[in-house]
Image (spheres, rainbow, N blue to C red):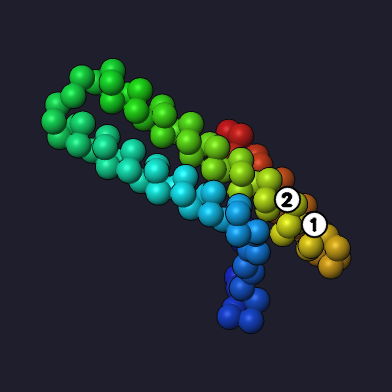
Amino acid sequence: MARPETDDTVRKAHHPYETKAHMLNRMKRIEGQIRGISRMIQEDVYCDDILHQFMSVESAIQGVKKTLLEAHVKSCVVEQIQNGELEVVDELMTTIRKMTK
């Protein structure tokens, strides 16, 4: 369970600009793909074509998740371990288990 956080203990990511820009650009494209799927459904496009678009979106989301996980481990997790906050390892393992279900 996530620990409650007050304004003084809110954790924030601090990823390089390039990493954030890459993820945000990818998310904007995914948003466009989702809107496209909605239009396809509204326009009665053939189901198999829509399913292929869903698979494309799922793949794109997986890519963003992998990018974020790598950035998280290389920055947030390393920093917390260096600060003696070893509970971050359990938190990370819980996240990985949920991602790989």
Quadrant of image for the C terminus: top right
Q: Secondary structure at mark 1?
A: helix
Q: Residue furthest bottom?
A: 8
In the rendered view, would you say 64 is above or below 1? above
Quadrant of image for the N terminus: bottom right
The total number of labels drawn is: 2
Residue at (56, 56) in percent of width and height: 20
Measuring from the top left, give residue 21's x and y in whole percent.
53, 54
- Crowd tier of the residue under label 2, counting other residues whose Cα lies within 10 Å: few below 14, some 14–19, many 20 or above: some
Res. 16 mark: none
Measuring from the top left, give residue 84's x and y in whole percent.
86, 65
Q: Amino acid at mark 2?
A: Val
- Residue position for label 1: 78
Horizontal relation, residue 52 to residue 11: left or right: left
For the residues labelled 1 and 2, say whether their Cβ atoms are less than 8 Å apart: yes
Q: Residue furthest left?
A: 43
Measuring from the top left, give residue 93's x and y in whole percent.
71, 45
In the rendered view, would you say 72 is above or below 61? below
Residue at (67, 51) in percent of width and height: 71
Q: Secondary structure at mark 2?
A: helix
Q: Quadrant of the rendered structure where residue 50 is? A: top left
In the rendered view, would you say 5 is above or below 34? below
Question: Disc 1 or 2, which lies upstream in sequence?
Answer: 2
Residue at (47, 45) in percent of width and height: 26
- Crowd tier of the residue under label 1, counting other residues whose Cα lies within 10 Å: few below 14, some 14–19, many 20 or above: some
Q: Amino acid at mark 1?
A: Val
Res. 73 mark: 2
Note whether residue 94 is visible. no
Q: Which residue is at the front of the view, 75 or 86?
A: 75
Measuring from the top left, give residue 89's x and y in whole percent.
77, 52
Cα distance between the residues tagged 1 and 2: 6 Å
